[in-house]
Amino acid sequence: MSCMHVVLYNLVSPGNNLRRLCNSERKRSVVRTNAGSRIISECHNVEVKAKVSEKLGKLGFVESKNVMEMEEKVIVGTYARTPVVLVSGKGCKLYDMEGREYLDMSSGIAVNALGHGDPEWLKAVVEQANTLTHVSNLYYSIPQVELAKHLVDCSFADRVFFSNTGTEANEAAIKFARKFQRHSHPDANEAATEFIAFTNSFHGRTMGALALTSKENYRSPFEPVMPGVTFVEYGNMQATKSLIRHGKTAAVFVEPIQGEGGIYSATKEFLQFLRSACDDAGALLVFDEVQCGLGRTGYLWAHEFYDVFPDIMTLAKPLAGGLPIGAVLVTERVASAINFGDHGSTFAGAPLVCNAALAVLDKISKPDFLANVSKKGKYFKKILMEKLGGSSHVREIRGAGLIIGIELDVSASPLVDACRNSGLLVLTAGKGNVVRLVPPLIITEQELDLATEILLEALPVLDEGN
């Protein structure tokens, strides 16, 4: 493996520039700061970069600005993109067109749980692509059945429905809940059709899932969305108690840990209360674990920590390691209400994506892997508290496992930009004042140290911006 020379620009402050240099003998990237040097990673493979550059050159993309200019002309403007064109990745590192290296603490929004280019995942994808990619749900396929069995074996559920995304999973859960109520009360004049959701919730952007999403600016341009949704303060048992009503409430949707909403965790008492209240009212309890599930908390399922189990659980993001998949896990009681033709999808549960998901689930569900996530999560929170907790701008550091939020008293955008310019990719959450950290679950403690140091070095930008 050869090494390439990379200059990584830091715009945090003139006196705090980071220079990444390659040590060709040791094949490692070295970061030099005013405080000294630290080795952070192996150099990116020049051969990979050369192949990528050749391909981009044929497309007419000589540098990042060419890609950005073309994007403005041909893609619908729904994304305020970060000004970076990423072209390759390995492990927890990403590389842009100019060869700059980034430590990825965003994981494609909590998707790449095994990082980039995991060998077992890659083998599963290539082998299945060479065997059978898609047949539709008109026919049986082995990877789909295997994946469903694996999910059933390691969860509360009896059956699985596959979708392509998290929002599709929540759409299916909405339909299943309403169908369940009609199936359970065939003689009722009006079956329960209403839903309870919570402040700071995010369940997706399609019309049903959007109706369950609390942020008003997501919903208002598209109203009227699905009617019959009531929002109540997350964690407020007293306020919720009178709203869950027999014959009215079809289901309660809740995230055990809210990701997009700001990394807020439910209490055990709150989820126990919801379980009891739903049982009393004949409503279904739906856990949305699209972002917090599948090992991110150090438990395979976030709700395992609380020892409270739902009737329906929705999954997506990390399940297939970057390929599109969603899943709805249900009890037999719920599944018995669903008949042929009640729901469906052309692409969902295809052999290719299910085989990739099997590779991911096999690795993540191992007890040693989960224990390591929990250990790294505790370590990360500890060093973040030690290094950043004393800042006047840091209100709270919260989360579980490797889903962590740093709440600030100002907008997090300047800090996010400064981190990116120093080679660290992080996200925002909440009202834009929370730094969201959802790295690949394979991240090392050394990489967590590096992320913390870059965050610390970038903090002064918050003073400059205010």
Image (cartoon, helix red, strand yellow):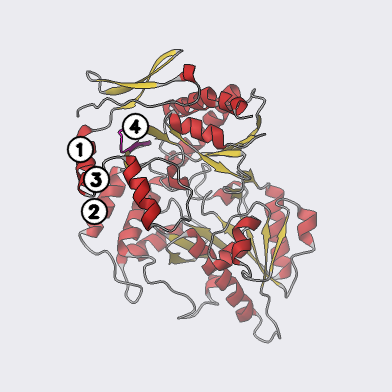
Please provide percent x and percent y for residue 137.
36, 73
For label 1, count other residues whose C-alpha is less than 10 Å away and answer few (under 14), some (14-19) or many (20+): few
* Residue underneath mark 1: 50
Q: Amino acid at mark 2?
A: Val
Cα distance between the residues tagged 3 and 2? 23 Å
> In the rendered structure, which disc, 1 or 3, sits on the residue that comes first in sequence?
1
Magenta stretch: give its range. 93-101
- Amino acid type at mark 3: Leu
Task: Note whether 202 is above or below 434 in the view shown.
Answer: below
Q: Please give the residue where the numbered disc 3 appears in the rendered image.
A: 56
Mark 2 element type = helix
Q: CA distance from mark 4 to mark 2?
A: 28 Å
Q: Give the residue type that dot 1 points to.
A: Ala
Left or right of 13, for residue 188: right
Residue 248 lies, in percent from the top left, at 72, 73
Looking at the rendered image, the quarter that the C terminus falls into is top right
Mark 1 / mark 2, whichever is N-terminal: 1
Q: Secondary structure at mark 4?
A: loop
